[in-house]
Image (cartoon, rainbow, N blue to C red):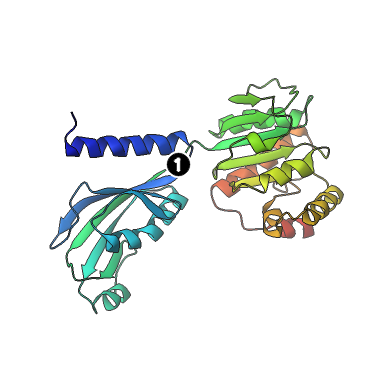
């Protein structure tokens, strides 16, 4: 039989397993040290998902509420971080915050007193490159499978009749462009190579998901045509603004391999948060 401590550890492990299996990004915040008066004890931990504490405790609402913004930054950067939470007497928290020397110190006005050191660790699922193909031989698609694996993506190809020489990590050929049945995550990088025939229904399905990147291979004329239809069907403008098209970094690519490199470069830029231009700026350039 589990004692209380073992049962808590079991519940925590079970929660982490469930979150990881579901492909969710989350942060685990653990108390590593305390000083003075505090309800928190070393080993107390919480699981933070989508801006909320969904498991555990840090000893009360005060430290848990202020840790949420830090958790979002940790998840975004992918780098763990330790912060010191000062539980100050009422009236002292704001002045102390104004004179804080580092971003790793947080001051909270409460009657508890004491300090808590909290270690935040991000957990992100394996990033996926999801390529939606039109069927048949496509050298750009083939090269992207190879490049995606070299960039440490899990490469998934959704294509009803692929003509690939490179083997993706996962091939889905039975959806027939019905992306409603595919489970996207916020860490997916989606490349649409449907070449016109299935662009609209593919983008419409994607508009219901929050993914890291969407790139569409299309001419400027077809972009205007497709986006006009999508707007008339009620697809949100902010979603359309996020689509990178014409796809790829402007490197005067000509060959299929060069085009694939330009797409991989754009994805790498987004992945590393170095993208400084919008789709509209690309169209004007």
Q: Residue 244: horizontal and vertical position, in percent?
A: 70, 50
Compared with 15, 245 (above or below) is below
Viewer-nearest residue: 46 or 233 = 233
Residue 147 in percent (x, y) is at 62, 32
Q: Report if residue 217 is visible in the image.
A: no
Q: Quadrant of residue 254?
A: top right
Write the residue at 45% across / 33% down: 21
- Please give the name of the residue rendered at 17% of the width and 52% of the height, measured from the top-left corner: 41
Q: Please tell me whether residue 77 is drawn above or below residue 22 in the rendered image.
A: below
Q: Position of residue 69 (x, y in %)?
A: 40, 60
State which quarter of the image contains the N terminus. Answer: top left
Q: Is residue 213 left or right of residue 98?
A: right
Q: Which residue is mark 1?
A: 124
Q: Position of residue 73 (x, y in %)?
A: 43, 56
Q: Secondary structure at mark 1?
A: loop
Work out whether residue 128 or residue 6 is closer to the camera in this orientation and state it.
6
Total labels drawn: 1
Residue 68 appears left or right of 166: left
Residue at 69% x, 43% y: name it: 205
Q: Quadrant of the C terminus?
A: bottom right
Q: Residue furthest front?
A: 1
On the rendered structure, is 283 left or right of 145?
Answer: right
Please state which of residues 103 and 255 is positioned toward the viewer in this rendering. 103
Residue at figure coordinates x 37%, y 38% from the top left: 16
Q: Nearer the viewer, residue 38 or 248?
A: 38
């Amino acid at each position: 039989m589990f004692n209380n401590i073992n049962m808590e550890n079991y519940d925590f492990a079970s929660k982490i397993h469930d979150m990881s299996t579901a492909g969710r990004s989350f942060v685990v915040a653990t108390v590593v040290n305390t000083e003075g008066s505090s309800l928190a004890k070393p080993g107390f931990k919480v699981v933070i998902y989508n801006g909320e504490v969904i498991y555990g405790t840090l000893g009360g609402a005060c430290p848990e509420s202020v840790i949420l913004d830090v958790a979002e930054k940790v998840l975004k950067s992918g780098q763990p971080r330790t912060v010191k939470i000062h539980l100050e007497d009422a009236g002292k928290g704001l002045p102390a915050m104004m004179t804080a020397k580092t971003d790793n110190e947080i001051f909270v006005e409460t009657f508890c007193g004491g300090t808590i050191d909290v270690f935040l660790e991000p957990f992100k699922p394996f990033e996926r490159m999801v390529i939606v193909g039109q069927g048949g031989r496509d050298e750009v698609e083939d090269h992207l499978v190879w490049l995606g694996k070299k960039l440490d993506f899990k490469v998934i190809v959704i294509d009803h009749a692929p003509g690939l020489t490179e083997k993706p990590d996962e091939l889905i050929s039975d959806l027939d462009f019905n992306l409603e049945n595919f489970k996207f995550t916020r860490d997916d990088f989606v490349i649409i190579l449907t070449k016109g025939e299935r662009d609209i229904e593919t983008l419409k399905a994607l508009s219901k998901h929050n993914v890291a990147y969407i790139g569409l291979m299309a001419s400027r004329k077809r972009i205007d045509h497709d986006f006009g239809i999508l707007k008339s069907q009620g697809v949100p403008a902010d979603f359309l603004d996020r689509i990178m098209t014409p796809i790829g970094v402007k490197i005067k690519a000509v060959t299929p391999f060069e085009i694939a490199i330009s797409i991989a470069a754009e994805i790498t830029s987004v992945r590393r948060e170095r993208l400084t231009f919008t789709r509209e700026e690309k169209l004007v350039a």
